[in-house]
Amino acid sequence: MPSNMKGRSFLRLMDCTPEEVNMLIDMAIDLKKMKRIGVYGKKLEGKNVALIFEKASTRTRCAFVVACYDEGAHPEYLGKDDIQLGKKETVKDTARVLGRMFDGIQFRGFKHETVEELAKWSGVPVWNGLTDKFHPTQVLADFQTVKEKFGYLKGIKFAYIGDGRNNMANSLMEGAAMVGMDYRIVSPKSLHPEAGLVNQCNEFAKKTEASITITDNIAEGVKGADVLYTDVWASMGEEDKIPERIALLKPYQITMDMVKKTGNPEVIFLHCLPSFHNNETDLSKKFPDICEATDEVFESKHSLVFDEAENRVHTIKAVMIATLGN
Ligand code: CP
Ligand code: NVA
């Protein structure tokens, strides 16, 4: 039991030590096994958990709710039109009110500063369920999926292809640096990550023997990869950028040809989801070239995206137990 995480918030992976990141992943693997054989715990019994959502969510919301019920906590959903956060009440005041009523708070929204403000003033653990800058709980589920497939994380060749400066690319870079992966961001130069964050990750990489490569060269970036990862080309809040992103990122679409370019027949395909991979959604009907991966790859034997989605619940449960559990 990671008692040293008790009472702490989880806003980005760098809030943890590398040992803690590895431990959360191992906890999630164990919690998954227990749930599969029908054994549930009471580690969150009597806890009240607030779930604040400024943006839409399927997986994160459901994972928090299911994880709470599995361990005996009570979750309360607070959508963007349900509370005053930042509109008629400061984030600081809402944080202090919620902290008097709830034992833990999840926040999904736009500005990373909002989740920092909640953590600063609520007095209870706050968990980042996605901001414009980071999506740390997703990375735990991604790495759990990698560990279940390959048995280890250190040295894994992990290629992230697409929008190299979004919340997923950033959080995966932090996570990869912490667990010692060979992490590559493969994207056009105009979408490369902020130098400051790359430098911070490189500092970690020195200790963990990770390596971080940022390139616009697809062949170089995917060579030998164990994991091909992508995300939508325009994140929530960037819908007006869809046409320009399609023009920039079309060559970076994950295709079977790219899978073959890795030279690794065991390579896996991961995606945080939701994903455009066919023309069956409203947006992909409107923008037929929006797909960041082809349907062929998404539905192929390489794709572990639904294991990865399931793992959201086990990893989020691990985070809540580690920081709040009885
Ligand atoms: N991957 C992820 O965070 O999914 P949701 O947006 O559905 O929560
Ligand atoms: N980058 C995406 C991730 C969704 C889980 C977004 O922020 O919309």
Image (cartoon, grey):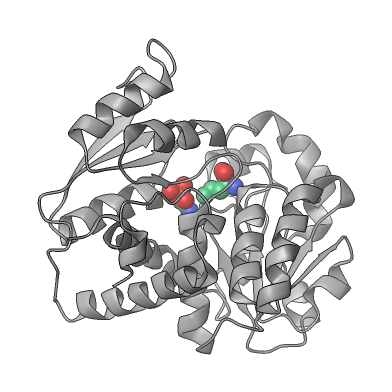
Q: Quadrant of residue 172?
A: bottom right
Q: Front-most of 174 and 54?
A: 174
Q: Does residue 15 appear left or right of residue 38 in this picture?
A: right
Instruction: Name the spot of residue 147 as percent of width and height, x first.
Output: 49, 81
Residue 115 visible? The answer is yes
Q: Front-most of 59 and 183?
A: 183
Q: Does residue 221 appear left or right of residue 295 in this picture?
A: right
Q: Does residue 13 appear left or right of residue 93 in this picture?
A: right
Q: Residue furthest front?
A: 4
Q: Is residue 143 above or below residue 119?
A: below
Instruction: Name the spot of residue 110 as percent of width and height, x first.
Output: 54, 32
Q: Quadrant of residue 255?
A: bottom right
Q: Quadrant of the N terminus?
A: bottom left
Q: Going 54% across and 88% down the picture, which residue do you hit? A: 150
Q: Does residue 73 appear left or right of residue 237 in this picture?
A: left
Q: Quadrant of the C terminus?
A: bottom left
Q: Going 60% across and 56% down the picture, which residue do you hit? A: 171
Instruction: Name the spot of residue 279 as percent of width and height, x first.
Output: 60, 50
Instruction: Name the spot of residue 94 as percent of width and height, x first.
Output: 33, 23
Q: Residue furthest top?
A: 88
> How many discs mark residues in the rendered view?
0
Q: Going 61% across and 83% down the picture, which residue do you hit? A: 154
Residue 182 visible? The answer is no
Q: Going 10% across and 50% down the picture, which residue do you hit? A: 46
Q: Front-most of 99 and 298?
A: 99
Q: Is residue 48 above or below residue 315?
A: above
